[in-house]
Image: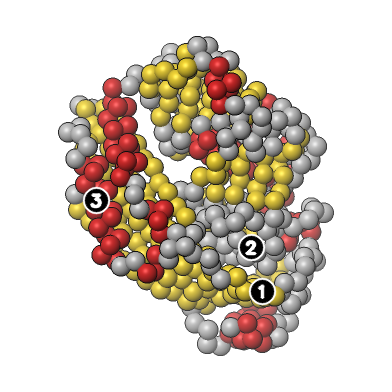
Amino acid sequence: MKDRIKEALKKTTADYAEIRVETEETTHLAYRGPEMESAGAASFCGGIVRACTRGGWGIIVFDSLDNLEEQVEKASLCAALVGEEKTELAEVRIVDTQLPARLENDPRGVSLEEKIRIIKSYNKIILEADPLIESSGVTYGDSFRTVHFANTRGTYYMEERPRIYCAFYATAREGSLVQRANDSFASAVTYDVVVGLEERVHDVAKRAVSLLKAPKVEGGPRTVILNRRMGGVFVHEAFGHLSEADFLYENHQMRDLMFLGREMGVESLNVVDDGSIDRTIGSLSFDDEGTPTNKTYLIQKGILSGHLHSLETAAKMDAEPTGNARALGRKYPPVVRMTNTYVENAEMSVEDLFADVDDGIYACDAFGGQTEFEMFTFSAGYGYRIEDGQIGDLVRDVVLTGNVFHTLKMIDGVANDLEISEGAGGCGKSGQAPLPVGFGSPHIRIRDVVIGGEL
């Protein structure tokens, strides 16, 4: 494959060209309610050629390796037709390597019947957990993606990128009130991540029922402690996307707000994106432009210290490439995306974080939300009252809203219990979703967060 795609690249007339060839094997199984909703397995092969001339890009997607040279010529011609400026792509070190996956329990060695048996058993647990359970959903998936990449600068790599996941939810109803709870787990290492989840599945079902009895949270400004998953989702959605340099380059107003050196919060606040962490679902050794991934501080000691870059944004914004040009699959061009984004540990214990809160809310997990530039709205999966430093009663409909710059400055406590979450969902951008990412945080305390609820 290496020789084949490098030989094809010799046909380019562009300033720069690259070929990404991918094969992928996938399995997908899903129950909804008492019935199996879908079951399938598939394999794919194809790729994409990108060529750049005078700053203009030509892109050709292919599903066969036949006539690869012709695809390169077509992409080069398209680039020449649209290019009107100057090709600006940052330089990175040339690599030539192969990176096979290091799996501990390969899902391809597990029978389809066994995979079905497991999710069927999880689905049964949900449906039989309580008479108030109205519906259930359990999904299993695995994929084994092999990426071959080469460009005209001399870089070549082959990397295998596996992923295994299981997600489940329970819907409970009492009269007109409906509540839902969910959870998911994923791994780039082992099929074992989906095995032995009976207790977690049962907890989800019972939580959905408990939320029917829980009161609505009182609205207004409150001290909020985010659990590790909610903290990770918050930093990914509310801040991480603002750090993506293609967004900043195209939005001058946000670029003016996201200037390096800006004070963002307390000195104990450090936010990182790191695609080089060993074998998480958000990790990769090289991005989809051939740039090595690494650890990039977005906020360091409370100061805005970095953005996420592709080759093009790095050149145009006079920065270093960070290895964050990622594509969902074989037919997509890479765009600037996060990998594993998280808040680093600080020195507070979780107990001390709670001890200073007389009346607050403990917001757990994330159920959904939206961001609009620097404004955000997030729904927690569930929450609890905090009373005199102790976790109290369950509450529902916990919605956090605010301005991310103001909210980051209101963080006054970061704990020392970081956990990077790997779930079945993913990140969406430019029509490419769900892209596997990791996100995480220690417990975080934030003062004066606006909580929606009953006033």
Residue 121: image tag:
3
Residue carrying label 2: 285
How does the figure colour the protein chain or chains? Answer: secondary structure
In this rendering, position of residue 334 left or right of residue 114: right
Where residue 90 appears, as percent x and y from the top left, is 78, 63
**Disc 2 to disc 3: CB gap under 8 Å:** no
**Disc 2 to disc 1: CB gap under 8 Å:** yes
Residue carrying label 1: 97
Q: Disc 2 and disc 3: Cα gap in Å?
A: 36 Å
At x 66%, y 32%, the residue is: 346
Closer to the camera in the image, 60 or 278: 278
Is label 3 in a helix, a strand or a loop?
helix
Where residue 95 appears, as percent x and y from the top left, is 72, 72
Is label 2 in a helix, a strand or a loop?
loop
Is label 1 in a helix, a strand or a loop?
strand
Closer to the camera in the image, 189 or 445: 189
At x 59%, y 21%, the residue is: 352
Can residue 435 be seen in the rendering of this structure? no
Residue 282 vs 26, above or below: the answer is above
At x 55%, y 41%, the residue is: 419
Mark found first going from the N terminus, 2 or 3: 3
Mark found first going from the N terminus, 2 or 1: 1
